[in-house]
């Protein structure tokens, strides 16, 4: 959370001529509640169910950039949906995330006395899962969303399989 998935995703979609969706926004529309309300009323497990449901639907589309919540990787079944496309990890240092999120009161998993510790714990719990991404983009605090999107686009060819395996250019 706070790494810029939505902002960078929108830029990528625009540059690639793709459509864009954010699973968190779709969850709120389908559930008829905000994410904080889902967490408060129904708990994290209910949110994770909504997340899997929405991801299963959007994974069927092509030419679509999807920004997901950072916890989507914790369910193994979600990986089957994610692997229908190219998975990109925007890897941001915790200290940068803390600065970006310090005034954000809408993140249920950060409603704690020590948000920095919560972010560190989440990253430590998920790091091995994030590492399964096709691309890992290291982000510095001064990187702009446009610079990040440009780096992602430059790196995509490095992970694409040759669509014509019997053709030698």
Image (cartoon, rainbow, N blue to C red):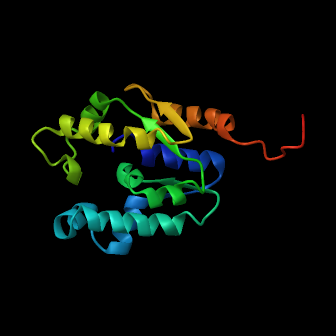
The residue at the point 20 percent across, 40 percent down is: 118
Q: Quadrant of residue 135?
A: top right
Q: In the image, is residue 90 above or below residue 59?
A: above
At which x and y percent is residue 80? 53, 59
**32 lies left or right of 117:** right
Q: In the image, is residue 58 above or below residue 129?
A: below
Quadrant placement of the N terminus: top left
- Given residues 158 and 129, the one toward you in this image is 129
At which x and y percent is residue 132? 50, 42
**134 lies left or right of 129:** right
- Given residues 34 and 166, the one toward you in this image is 166
Q: Quadrant of residue 84?
A: bottom right
- Given residues 79 and 38, the one toward you in this image is 79
Quadrant placement of the C terminus: top right
Q: In the image, is residue 52 above or below residue 112?
A: below
The residue at the point 43 percent across, 45 percent down is: 5
At which x and y percent is residue 140? 41, 25
């Amino acid at each position: 959370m706070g790494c810029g998935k939505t902002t960078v995703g929108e830029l990528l979609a625009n540059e690639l001529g793709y459509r864009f969706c954010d699973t968190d926004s779709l969850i709120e529309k389908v559930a008829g509640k905000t994410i904080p309300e889902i967490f408060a009323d129904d708990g994290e497990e209910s949110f994770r169910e909504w997340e899997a449901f929405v991801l299963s639907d959007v994974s069927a589309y092509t030419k679509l950039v999807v920004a997901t919540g950072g916890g989507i990787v914790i369910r193994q079944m979600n990986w089957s949906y994610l692997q229908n496309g190219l998975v990109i990890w925007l890897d941001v240092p915790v200290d940068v995330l803390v600065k970006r999120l310090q005034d954000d009161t809408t993140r249920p998993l950060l409603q704690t006395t020590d948000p920095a510790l919560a972010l560190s714990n989440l990253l430590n719990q998920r790091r091995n899962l994030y590492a399964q991404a096709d691309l890992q983009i290291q982000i510095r605090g001064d990187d702009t969303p446009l610079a990040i999107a440009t780096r992602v686009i430059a790196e995509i060819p490095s992970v694409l399989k040759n669509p014509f395996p019997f053709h030698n250019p």
